[in-house]
Amino acid sequence: MNKNRLIIILGAILLCYMGWTNKYPLLTSASGTFINSGFTREVPWFGNLWYGLVITHASWASSLWLVIFFQAGLMAVLIYLFFKYFIKLPEYPLWALGFITFITGFTTASVTVSTIEPHIFSGLSVLSGGILLFAKEICRRDFILVSVIFVFSCSMDPSNMLSMVFLSTLFMIFGLISVRRKGTELLQKSVLVLAFTIISILMVSFIHHGVGGKFSPVNSYHTAILPGLMTTEQFQASLMQNPEGMEDKLDSLLDSKSLEMVQENDFVRAHGIYSAQNAIREMVALETDDAIMFSDSTVTLRAVFDYYNHEVRDVFISRQIFKIMQVKTWGGVQVWVSLAGLLLGVFVLKRHKNSSGYGFVIYLMAGWPVLAFCNSVFYGQAGLQSHLAWLWVFPMFIFFRESKAVQQHLSRISAILSINVISKTT
């Protein structure tokens, strides 16, 4: 087997570490909704149908293990390609494997990969978008592969689509401003990323229309933002004015034909202001959210029982069910790792302007508040930035690549290892 493919496979296995530890893919209260939507072909009231279909087909309707293997495989491929085009060293496959090992041990990347939820694809859409924008002299095969993964990942969640529309437009404007100094390359690539984002929106809209829904990337625009809307003070105050009719009010919101309650109370405008304010809090909310602890969701358990009946026993012997998953430890370490990545990223911008990863660091720093805002629009205070924190390790490795001191230490370690190997063979 090709050495590079072996490294990708090994990286994917490492990324599923939390699944191995749990003895089963991690489940949340929302996992059941996605599983059900994939088999029933009903568009869920939040998110979209695409991830549910991916669960159905990636699992071959036989095992949820195949879903997290699929997610880990896509992530390992993108990380490998990132180091191929941004590190540009003969040993880049080993750099990629080292990166995967690091984020598995010191961030919650493995938690995100091993969970039956579309959060991993937020990071993959950002990473693939960054490769499309800033990779130099990318070969046709890799370009097609990254483009397909980008469209695929962007389609998984409406927040991904909105984020990439904002990000591609932002860099398109920057490309227009700097066209005289830097040429049209960034402008052309930004237009291409925006075009791919529009393709993902249209693709999901066609899928929804094909199963009898509306030609729209979401079930309904006002219910798509309902998880985030419910966290606003104005919405909660309106519900508490008549606690007895609370259930009826929620039912009216879930009815895609009724917008009266939303329009009458001007919730959407208030939600937009709240999302902008909440984005500031979300940018630094990098500890793992409690949803992963899985509070015995009946919907999720029922979905596994209905469609993966032979795996019900595995669910009930998992560490997650017994609430002994120590995910919070990774969340605490992740905060410091992300801070280190941010500081080293700033150092790269100041000292290594000719670095091949310079543009990607700018992209990540500009995109972080955009991602926080878009996640706030759809999900409120959900702590979803914790699922993206592993991206901050990229600036750290870019710094290692550019630092002469680090390179000298790596050369010494490599020389010592080579001497040991030679001595053992002789």
Image (tube, rainbow, N blue to C red):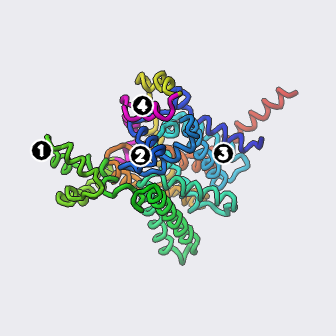
Residue type, numbered disc 3: Gln
Dividing the picture into quadrants, the one containing residue 356 is: bottom right
Residue 244 position, x and y percent, is: 13, 40
Of the residues tagged 1 and 2, which is closer to the observer? 1
Check if mark 4's residue and mark 3's residue have beta carbons within 8 Å: no
Q: Is residue 340 visible?
A: no
Residue that label 4 marks:
301
Residue type, numbered disc 4: Leu
Of the residues tagged 4 and 3, which is closer to the observer? 4
Residue that label 1 marks:
242
Residue type, numbered disc 1: Asn
Mark linked to residue 407: 3
Residue that label 2 marks:
385
Instruction: State the SS at label 3.
Output: helix
Residue 102 position, x and y percent, is: 57, 37
Residue type, numbered disc 2: Gln
The magenta region covers 282-309
The reply to whether the magenta stretch includes residue 316 is no
Residue 314 position, x and y percent, is: 51, 25
- Considering only vertical position in the picture, is 11 above or below 311? below
- Residue situated in front as seen by the camera: 58 or 360: 58
Of the residues tagged 3 and 1, which is closer to the observer? 1
CA neighbours of label 2 inside 10 A, class few (<14), some (14 to 19), many (20+): many
Q: Earlier in the sequence, mark 4 or mark 1?
A: 1
Q: Is residue 296 left or right of residue 8?
A: left
Check if mark 3's residue and mark 2's residue have beta carbons within 8 Å: no
CA gap between label 3 and label 1 equals 65 Å
Q: Is residue 381 left or right of residue 400?
A: left
Q: Is residue 267 left or right of residue 369?
A: left
CA neighbours of label 4 inside 10 A, class few (<14), some (14 to 19), many (20+): many
Q: Earlier in the sequence, mark 1 or mark 2?
A: 1
